[in-house]
Image: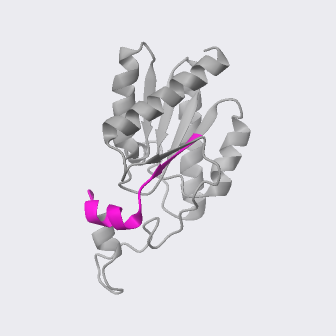
């Protein structure tokens, strides 16, 4: 099984993935976390942030996830996944494996959290040398999933509550698929 988490920067994708990995281990379920930020410095270091590069990044991350899934692990991809069409294409490539989980948090809350300082940079005036012009959700689009398999609201629920919901979803999917 492959879980493609999608959501804006700071919504809690990696935090949830790591929390679920720890909870799943207690249940005897092996989870591999494929973190987009980490792979940007290795497998995907040749890619920029154009639409084409972002889509290629996701193809590569999904290929890694598929390898983990074939080994019997639940692979959780923690990446923004901004484009609806790319998410759909990946689901078509791996129709039995991929489940889309929307990690939803309003932009207003993300700007307040701003754990990486990205929103502060994105909201700088044009011409500022530190301005980040292509932040997803501010300068670049984020296309909300129309029918995610699971929709988590990290502004309304704690990490514990959200990670338990995600783990329960994974366990239900495994039971349905007999794995």
- Asked if residue 154 is positioned above or below residue 128 in the image, the reply reads above
Q: Residue 142 at x, y = what percent?
A: 53, 63
Please identify the quadrant where the N terminus is shown: top right
Seen from the viewer's position, the closer of residues 129 and 113 is: 113
Residue 7 visible in rendering: yes
Which residue sits at x=34%, y=25%? 22
How was the colour assigned to the protein in this rendering? one colour
Q: Residue 57 at x, y = what percent?
A: 54, 49
Q: Quadrant of residue 38?
A: top left
Which residue sits at x=39%, y=30%? 20
- Asked if residue 62 is positioned above or below residue 41 in the image, the reply reads above
Seen from the viewer's position, the closer of residues 49 and 21 is: 21
Left or right of residue 157, residue 43 in this image? right
Which residue sits at x=33%, y=62%? 109
Seen from the viewer's position, the closer of residues 59 and 8 is: 8
Q: Residue 119 at x, y = what percent?
A: 32, 68
Which residue sits at x=26%, y=56%? 115
Q: Is residue 102 magenta?
A: yes
Left or right of residue 150, residue 31 in this image? left
- Asked if residue 159 is positioned above or below residue 146 in the image, the reply reads above
Residue 33 visible in rendering: no
Total residue callouts: 0
- Asked if residue 146 is positioned above or below residue 148 in the image, the reply reads below
Seen from the viewer's position, the closer of residues 112 and 75 is: 112
Farthest residue, direction front: 156
Q: Residue 78 at x, y = what percent?
A: 45, 43
Left or right of residue 73, residue 13 in this image? left
Please identify the quadrant where the C terminus is shown: top right
Numbered range of the magenta stretch? 100-116
Q: Is residue 26 magenta?
A: no
């Amino acid at each position: 099984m492959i879980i493609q988490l999608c959501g804006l920067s700071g919504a809690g994708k990696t935090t949830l993935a790591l929390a679920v990995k720890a909870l799943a281990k207690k249940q005897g379920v092996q989870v591999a976390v494929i973190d987009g930020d980490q792979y940007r410095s290795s497998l995907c270091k040749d890619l920029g942030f154009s639409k084409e590069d972002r889509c290629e990044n996701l193809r590569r991350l999904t290929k890694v996830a598929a390898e983990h899934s074939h080994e019997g692990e639940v692979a959780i991809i923690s990446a923004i996944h901004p484009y609806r069409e790319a998410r759909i294409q990946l689901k078509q490539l791996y129709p039995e494996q991929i489940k889309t989980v929307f990690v939803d948090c309003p932009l207003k809350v993300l700007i307040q959290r701003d754990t990486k300082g990205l929103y502060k940079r994105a909201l700088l005036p044009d011409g500022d040398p530190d301005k980040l012009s292509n932040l997803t959700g501010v300068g670049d689009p984020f296309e909300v999933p129309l029918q995610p398999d699971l929709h988590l609201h990290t502004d309304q629920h704690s990490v514990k509550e959200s990670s338990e919901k995600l783990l329960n979803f994974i366990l239900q999917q495994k039971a349905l698929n007999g794995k």
